[in-house]
């Protein structure tokens, strides 16, 4: 049996360190996924494709991971409604892009929240993770054997992951209830203000 473990980070730097640590511990990069906000254009790997119009590129992101470079070598850019431009790699990015394309042509809605819940992430957490990415964060998700789930979660936590319950509570204090894909993506200035709220002293 497999289990999905996830962690939200305030920056790509922390998330990428967690991905590298998972791979170093022997978790296959084909079972690890990364979705990171790219509004600040820190990754310049080409123009972002519209995920709702071009799921093929999203699926290609997942397929690109077969090389020896690991997950981070397969980063691609997508524009996801409600999140804005993101840098993504792995199975979750492919699933989310495919779900968005299906929704665009009348299929089931989904996107990032749907991909997470389909993978076994509680819906409440999935909404918080998606909102965290919208506000400038990065999400790492791994499919792991049950016997190694605690190990994977410990690796994710070691790299300064966000306490998802505390972050949800902070969002809710500001009036937030759930991720809204029709909401405008955060601007660079809004992301900077958001990060300042949680920056360690």
Image: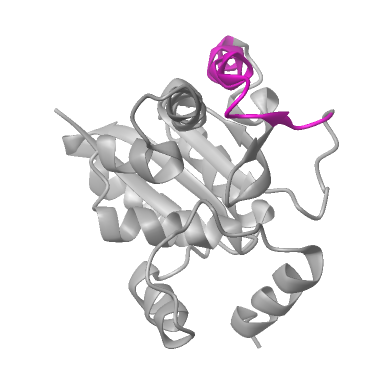
- Quadrant in the rendering for residue 146: top left
Q: Main secondary structure of the magenta part?
A: helix
Residue 200 screen position, x and y as percent: 62, 82
Horizontal side of 115 relative to 145 (left or right) equals right
Residue located at (25% from left, 43% from top): 149
Q: Residue at x 67, y 30 (%)?
A: 50
Height in image: 177 above or below 18?
below
Residue sitting at x 38%, y 37%: 110
Residue 159 in sight in this render: no
Q: Quick one: 64 or 171, which is closer to the camera? A: 171
Membership of 101 in magenta stretch: no
**Going by the image, does 43 lie left or right of 86?**
right
- The reply to whether residue 193 is in sight is yes
Chain part drawn in magenta: 47-66
* Quadrant in the rendering for residue 165: bottom left
Q: Position of residue 108 (x, y in %)?
A: 33, 29
Q: Say whether residue 52 is magenta.
A: yes
Residue farthest to the left, as pictured = 1
Vertical order, 39 against 72 (above or below): below
User: In this rendering, is residue 105 above or below 35?
Assistant: above
């Amino acid at each position: 049996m497999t289990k999905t473990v996830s962690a939200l980070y305030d920056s790509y730097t922390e998330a990428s360190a967690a991905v590298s640590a998972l791979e170093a511990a022997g978790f296959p990069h084909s079972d690890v996924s990364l979705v990171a906000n790219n509004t600040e254009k820190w990754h310049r790997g080409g123009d972002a494709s519209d995920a709702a119009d071009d799921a093929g590129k999203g699926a290609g992101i997942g397929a690109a991971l077969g090389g020896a470079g690991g997950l981070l070598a397969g980063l691609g850019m997508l524009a996801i409604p409600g999140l804005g431009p993101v840098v993504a790699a792995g199975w979750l990015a492919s699933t989310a892009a495919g779900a968005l394309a299906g929704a665009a042509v009348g299929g089931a809605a989904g996107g990032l929240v749907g991909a997470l819940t389909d993978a076994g992430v509680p819906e409440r957490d999935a909404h918080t993770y998606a909102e965290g990415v919208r506000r400038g964060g990065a999400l790492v998700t791994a499919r792991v054997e049950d016997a190694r789930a605690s190990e994977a979660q410990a690796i994710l936590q070691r790299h300064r992951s966000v306490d998802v319950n505390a972050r949800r509570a902070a969002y809710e204090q500001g009036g937030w209830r759930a991720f809204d894909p029709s909401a405008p993506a955060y601007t660079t200035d809004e992301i900077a203000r958001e990060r300042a709220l949680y920056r360690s002293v």
